[in-house]
Amino acid sequence: MTKNDCLGQIIDSLLAIQHRGQDAAGAVTYDGSIFHIKKGNSLVRDVFKEKNIKRLTGKVGLGHVRYPTIGSGSNEDAQPLYINSPYGIVMVHNGNVANYRELKEKLNASKRHINTSSDVEIILNVFAESLKNKTKFSSQAVFDSAKEVMEKVKGGYSVVGYIANKGMFAFKDPHGIKPLFFARKGDQVLFSSETVTSDVLEFDFVDEVKPGEMIWVSEMTRETVRKTLLRKEYRPCIFEWVYFARPDSIIEGVSVYEARFRMGAELALQMKDKNISADAVIPVPDTARTAALAISEGLKIPFKEGLIKNRYIWRTFIMPNSEKRDYSLRHKLNPIKSEIRGKRIILVDDSIVRGVTSKKIISLVREAGASEIIFASTSPPIKFPCIYGIDMQTKSELIAHDKSVEDVAGFIGADRLFYLSVEGLKKAVSLINPKVFVAGTNCFCDACFTKSYPGDITEEELLTVEKERLKDRFISGDQNVHSIFDKKKQLS
Ligand code: SF4
């Protein structure tokens, strides 16, 4: 950003991407001599008060909404993070560091103090240590330091940072797993995870930040320089189109709305082959609505609204604690009994992760009088943990990990269950932009369905991430995890 009241624009952007994380929010601005930081464990609207807007002055800044991955979820872990040496650097990121423990030990050994359990602090310290060791500051020194991050840090990360009085930068991991794009309005520059922010702020989209690329916006020369530092196979997260991104966002030229519609159309084809008949197609609001429309069209079965969502309750899947999820679901959805009673329903949802939410929704629809429930998931079976930043890391919690489709249907209480196939999902997204996503190539990260993790992730690293995640949940008092520990004694 390069506008004096940039905080207002940052807050507007954060509100537009609040769906990406509701655990914490924060922002930093720089007024030419001092960084002003405000962050807290709450929603954007609750973190930023009138007095903060007055205090956080400056024409450059960063904002963040946190989705908890590894980390205790404390206030200190909220982003942006600041480091005073060299020059004064602030940073935010989206993603997850897979070799967090190893890098933390190395940084500690090199006398760097790691103060939080947020993995952006690892990226920030690797970057700062490298920049500090350069003989003098230059744009090339910034590129070289980002390259060192890409060489050392495994995982999926999109990073935006600012170096006091020198410039702003953005870079993506070499596989380009997490979304990040940049936009302009006059001499203002915007980096963001989703294009909805440029719509809201009326910026013009310029391009995606490419895998392994850094974009440097120099305050000294006013130049914008792009360099690919370390590129590997492009593997953007396919789950962004399934669930995470807003339907009005566009990632790599692929409209999230259009992709979801095509997912529904592909799923309808799979169901047609099995001679499915029903009285109504009902979406679980809101993500699945678009796919449900396509299923309704494809199977020629009427689309109905049968579940009403209370919009003022937090999303369940990204809430960190399963007890909160249970509480929230009961207060979030209410059935329209007249649309359900005595009917054979195709219930469409975006995914089945732990199975607990799907089970509760099915029971709600059954209690409302459905005579038969066919459950349709626009995501394939989620069998493996995500180590790149989506909160489904513990294998033991994934219902499809060791169960057949029939067994999952039994667990959630569905009469029949259909998952979109991995091929169908890839086809739905890639056909919209075949220039970038070439059919038949390994052009997405789909590791949570296939275990094909981008990068050389070892079994040991997978196990470490699993244990860290379980430990965090245990500490937060998650009863599901307590029972896993009781049964398996996973932490010795
Ligand atoms: S493992 Fe799944 S959720 Fe995680 S980045 Fe890959 S596709 Fe996305």
Image (cartoon, rainbow, N blue to C red):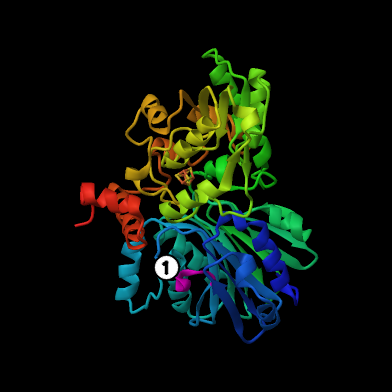
Identify the residue at horizontal 75%, vertical 77% (top origin): 4
Q: Alpha-carbon neighbours of circle 1 within 10 Å: few (<14), some, or many (≥20)?
A: many
Residue 42's place in the image compared with 440, above or below, is below
Image coordinates for residue 117, horizontal then vertical, percent: 39, 68
**Magenta residue check for 34:** no
Image coordinates for residue 219, horizontal then vertical, percent: 68, 75
Quadrant housing the C terminus: bottom left
Q: Pick whichever, 79 or 483, lies toward us.
A: 483
Give the amino acid at mark 1: Ile
Residue 135's place in the image compared with 66, above or below, is below
Mark 1 close to ligand 1, CB under 8 Å: no
* Residue 262 visible somewhere in the drawing: no
Image coordinates for residue 403, horizontal then vertical, percent: 34, 31
Report the predominant secondary structure element of the magenta stretch: loop
Q: Which residues are magenta?
A: 73-80
Horizontal relation, residue 444 to residue 154: left or right: right
Number of marks present in the image shown:
1
Quadrant housing the N terminus: bottom right
Identify the residue at horizontal 64%, vertical 53% (top origin): 194
Q: Secondary structure at mark 1?
A: helix
Q: Pick whichever, 142 or 114, lies toward us.
A: 114
**Residue found farthest to the bottom:** 33
> In the figure, residue 434 lies in which quadrant?
top right
Identify the residue at horizontal 58%, vertical 22% (top origin): 342
Horizontal relation, residue 53 to residue 470: left or right: right
* Residue 243 visible somewhere in the drawing: yes
Image coordinates for residue 485, horizontal then vertical, percent: 25, 52
Residue 435's place in the image compared with 81, above or below, is above
Q: Pick whichever, 191 or 439, lies toward us.
A: 191
The residue under label 1 is 122
Q: Pick whichever, 1 or 259, lies toward us.
A: 259
Identify the residue at horizontal 41%, vertical 35% (top origin): 450
